[in-house]
């Protein structure tokens, strides 16, 4: 684990119309992680080209991270798709994806 990442939670406040308002908040800032780029591809969605990148980040086991959150690595944001425990439960793997 040789890189720093930040884990952010989505906004939870809603306005009178029920729309979500507010900013993402840091749950865990500048924690150590081992980040590996798994895949990168360009696909068509709705007739437009979309670039997707998948990464996996290994962090120490925590109970405050789930798949509603996002990971920020070197200024880029990735949606957390899965949170997987390691066999010995000392670490966890965050499978993330970014689409642009």
Image: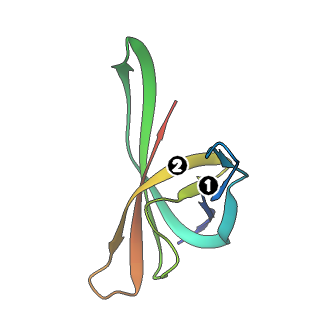
Secondary structure type for disc 1? strand
Compared across the picture, whether 40 is left or right of 16 comes to left
Q: Relative to 70, is 89 on the left or the right?
A: left
Where is mark 1, residue-wise? 72
Q: Residue 65: percent from the left, percent from the top?
A: 50, 72
Q: Which residue is mark 2?
A: 78
Measured Cα–Cα span from mark 2 to mark 1: 6 Å
Do the numbered discs 2 and 1 sit on residues whose CB atoms are within 8 Å? yes
x, y percentage for residue 66?
A: 45, 68
The residue at the far right in this view is 22
Position of 30 relative to 56 (above/below): below
Residue at x-position 34% and y-position 86%: 89
Number of marks:
2
Label 2 sits on a secondary structure element that is: strand
Q: Which mark is residue 99?
A: none
Tell which of 12 and 29 is nearer to you.
12
Q: Residues within 10 Å of mark 2 (few under 14, many from 20)?
A: many
Mark 1, other Cα within 10 Å: few <14 / some 14–19 / many ≥20: some
The structure residue drawn at horizontal position 65% and vertical position 42%, both measured from the top left corner, is 17
Residue 23: % across, % down: 72, 52
């Amino acid at each position: 684990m040789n890189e720093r990442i930040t884990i952010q939670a989505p906004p939870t406040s809603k306005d009178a119309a029920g729309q979500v308002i507010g900013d993402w908040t840091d749950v865990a800032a500048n924690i150590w992680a081992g980040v590996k780029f798994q895949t990168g591809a360009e696909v068509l969605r709705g007739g437009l080209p979309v670039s997707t990148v998948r990464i996996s980040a290994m962090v120490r086991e925590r109970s405050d991270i789930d798949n509603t959150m996002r990971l920020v690595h070197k200024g880029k944001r990735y949606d957390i798709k899965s949170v997987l425990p390691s066999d010995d439960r000392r670490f966890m793997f965050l499978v993330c994806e970014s689409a642009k």
